[in-house]
Amino acid sequence: MPAEAVSATSEAPASHASPVTAPAPARPAIVRGEANYVPVANPGVLEGFARRTLLQDPRDWPLLKLNLWISAVLLPFAIYLFVPGAFRWWLAPPYLALVFLVFVDRYILMLHNISHRPLFKARFRWLNNWIVWVLGPLMGESPETYAAHHIGMHHAEGNLEPDLSTTMHYQRDNALHFAHYYLRFVTVGIFELSAYFAKRKRYQRLRRMLAGELSFYALAAVLGIFVSWQATLIVLVIPFCTVRFLMMCGNWGQHAFIDAASPENSYRNSITCINTRYNRRAFNDGYHIGHHLRAAMHWTEMPVEFQKNVAKYAAERSIVFEGIDFFQVWGMLMLGQHRRLAGRMVSLDGNERSVEEKVAFLRERLRPIRREVASPATNVATAA
């Protein structure tokens, strides 16, 4: 997919952040080479048909094209591994290389985008089932669970206390705290999510999630017992376990730095990563602050929103890293590499600070946050 530099041309999104005073004069951060797609005037036959007939937004051709590639390359490979007598262990490395080095990061962030914005026009919306129910299990995603957790719960709660994946209560540069966070998710997470929807009487979302989750387990059991446990391990189990771990790493990195004085403020409870290979592969997923401000913003518009509103980001003291992604942020936190993280921080207001000042600022936002309910409408936040 072509990557082009983006200029600021769109309107600024509405903000729900707390008011600030005396914003520092900001200089535009340099955004270059991020993911972008401009529909060409004379597309090929397949692209032209998709844009005219199938796609809700013609800019989403790269998302549909990714699914076509997975269907044409990975799906036949996966089916072949289940053919009686066909499985050979030497086929496992190239298959897993295709999954994890070629497709999985792009698939998950494609799934993220189509969970927020429909990929297909209304009369073709049923095609979404192919992406979620057929391709999803190959990518480590049990059908419907991602949308339930991310759209139905995480965005509804915004990393605050009711969010089952909140990072607020943890020391977010502590590997033992992350281990607790991850193990809770993989052991009781599905039960907590079921209780979350049941308590709120969101039964349709609950039914769809349980149907997808239980169908995945049933499929793995049947294929593992009656067809090939080896192929089941490679095609379903390893991607499923690996992707769930990676998604928790990613969410931890996205919400590692939180301002205890304003944990509900998207500018201060999320981070943004710019000018990174990850953005070019994963449809600008690094612009996480902008995503929480406007969840339905199109992926091609995210660098534009950031560039146009960099002064606001600076005034809010948002944390923006350059040249690294959320997984690298997570890795540096687990290894205690605060100075390396500080070296990647973008000085949004043009005032360069010392490494020591940056490290102190980062450490302050990594502290666990406990909030006591002072009244039905008031929360008091304290950093432990």
Image (cartoon, grey):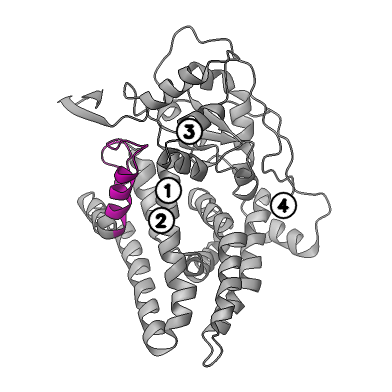
Residue 287 spot, x, y in % from top left: 55, 37
On the rendered structure, is 165 left or right of 325?
A: left
Q: From where the camera sits, is residue 287 visible?
A: yes
Q: Nearer the viewer, residue 179 or 185?
A: 179
Residue at the spot 22% in from the left edge and 28% down from the top edge: 371
Q: Is residue 281 above or below residue 311?
A: below
Residue 231 picture location, percent across and down:
48, 80
Seen at 26% across and 41% down, the residue is 162
Bounds of the magenta span? 160-186
User: Residue 113: where, in percent of width, then height?
Assistant: 53, 50
Q: CA distance from mark 2 to mark 1?
A: 6 Å
Give the percent coordinates (x, y) of residue 108.
Answer: 52, 56
Residue placed under numbered mark 3 in the picture: 271
Q: Which kind of residue does numbered mark 3 sit on?
A: Ile
Which callout, 1 or 3, points at the residue further toward the start of the chain? 1
How dense is the environment of label 3, judged by Cα within 10 Å: few (below 14), some, or many (20 and up)?
many
110 left or right of 73 in image:
left
Residue 14: say if magenta: no
Q: Residues within 10 Å of mark 1 (few under 14, many from 20)?
A: many
Q: CA distance from mark 2 to mark 4?
A: 27 Å
Give the amino acid at mark 1: Cys
Point out which mark residue 245 bears: 2
Does the residue at mark 2 contact the one at mark 1 (Cβ under 8 Å)? yes
Label 4: element kind: loop
